[in-house]
Amino acid sequence: MEKNVRLRVLYVMELFVQQTDAENGVTMQEILDWLADHNLTGERKSIYEDIHALKEFGLDIQYTQSDKTYRLASR
């Protein structure tokens, strides 16, 4: 389990870096699907915590209410 938690936050970061930008975001379900594709699990609450940790780390992750997506707004 601990390995899963450590890897999960890195895979979430990889998703943001590779597949999002200021104009293209991902939904929470897409994040969960991305993790499942990499044989990792997580609940919504844990993904919110991962996103918060990545923001504290310095990533400019923003949430857009209109389409309910998360994106890496700047690099």
Image: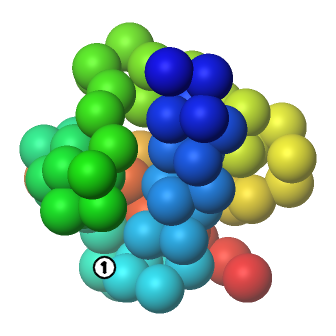
| Disc 1 residue crowd, few under 14, some 14–19, many 20+, Cα 10 Å | few
Using the rendered view, name the quadrant where residue 19 is placed. bottom left
Residue at 44% x, 69% y is 15
Is residue 75 at least partly visible in the picture? Answer: yes
Above-or-below relation of 71 to 28: below
Q: Position of residue 16 (x, y in %)?
A: 49, 69
How many labels sit on residues?
Answer: 1
Q: Which residue is mark 1?
A: 24
Q: Quadrant of the C terminus?
A: bottom right
Q: Nearer the viewer, residue 26 or 68?
A: 26
Using the rendered view, name the quadrant where residue 23 is placed. bottom left
Above-or-below relation of 62 to 51: below
Residue at 38% x, 53% y is 70
Instruction: Using residue 45 as the reference point, say whether residue 73 is left or right of it.
Output: right
Instruction: Using residue 58 as the reference point, say whether residue 45 is left or right of it.
Output: left
Residue at 71% x, 45% y is 54
Residue at 41% x, 46% y is 63
Q: Residue furthest top?
A: 45
Q: Position of residue 18 (x, y in %)?
A: 47, 85
Using the rendered view, name the quadrant where residue 32 is placed. top left
Instruction: Using residue 37 as the reference point, say whether residue 39 is left or right of it.
Output: right
Under mark 1, the amino acid is Asn
Q: Nearer the viewer, residue 60 or 18?
A: 18
Above-or-below relation of 38 to 28: below
Is residue 27 at least partly visible in the picture? Answer: no
Above-or-below relation of 48 to 66: above
Query: Quick one: SS at disc 1?
Result: loop
Q: Position of residue 14 (x, y in %)?
A: 54, 71
